[in-house]
Image: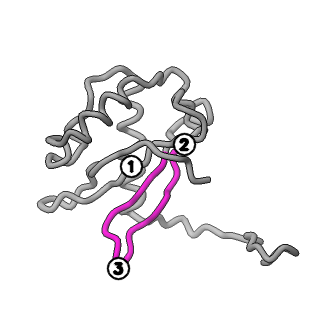
Amino acid sequence: MRDSDSTWRLGNATCDGQVDTSVHGAWLLVTGFLFRLQNHQPFPTELIAADWLRTEEFKLAKARISSLNFANYGMFGHEGRCVSVASAPSQTQKYVELEAGPSCYLDIEAWTAIRFRVVRKAASGKPIIGEFQFGKWQP
């Protein structure tokens, strides 16, 4: 439905209980990655694409995410509810983008988020983090 200022607003929604497996798998991967960092486990490089692991960009991103304080991660709710879908696969886009924004309480700069791009391994089809980067949060 449209509001008086011509913006769209959801008036009604229903759930049939089905999930998009590519999006849900990506969400499980990213929330698992963040929980492992919260629990001070070794950095989960096995969840990251091998070609990105070899880049300077990865080394910088790893240092930045490793320096975050994860003590309050999950205050919004358990099970990674603060991680949201930024974009889903389509005919022209073969990846899922997820965002861990301010509601994840990761003690990063105001209005900053971590955006994860999740791709599928060619051999197995399993989701893997293709890259992550810090940027302006997109509410």
Amino acid type for the residue under numbered disc 1? Phe
**Looking at the image, which residue is at 55% across and 24% down?**
72
Residue plotted at (25% across, 39% down): 58
43 shown above or below 47: above
For label 3, count other residues whose C-alpha is less than 10 Å away and answer few (under 14), some (14-19) or many (20+): few
Does residue 13 show up? yes
How much space separates mark 1 and mark 3, taking CA atoms? 20 Å
Q: Is residue 98 left or right of residue 63?
A: right
Image spot of residue 122 (x, y percent)? 15, 62
User: Which residue position holds label 1?
Assistant: 116
Under mark 3, the amino acid is: Gln
Label 2 sits on a secondary structure element that is: loop
Which mark is first along the chain, 1 or 2?
A: 2
Question: Residue visible at 75% across and 70% down?
Answer: 9
In the rendered image, which quarter is residue 91 located in?
bottom left
Q: Residue at x 60, y 30 (%)?
A: 75
Q: Which scheme is used to colour this image of the protein? A: one colour
Please name the amino acid that badge 2 sits on: Gly
Q: Residues within 10 Å of mark 2 (few under 14, many from 20)?
A: many
Q: CA distance from mark 2 to mark 1?
A: 11 Å
SS at mark 1 in the image: strand
Query: Which residues, given as a range, are shown in magenta?
Result: 83-99
Nearest the viewer among 13 and 38 is: 38
The residue wearing badge 2 is 101
From the image, tell me which residue sits under label 3.
Answer: 91
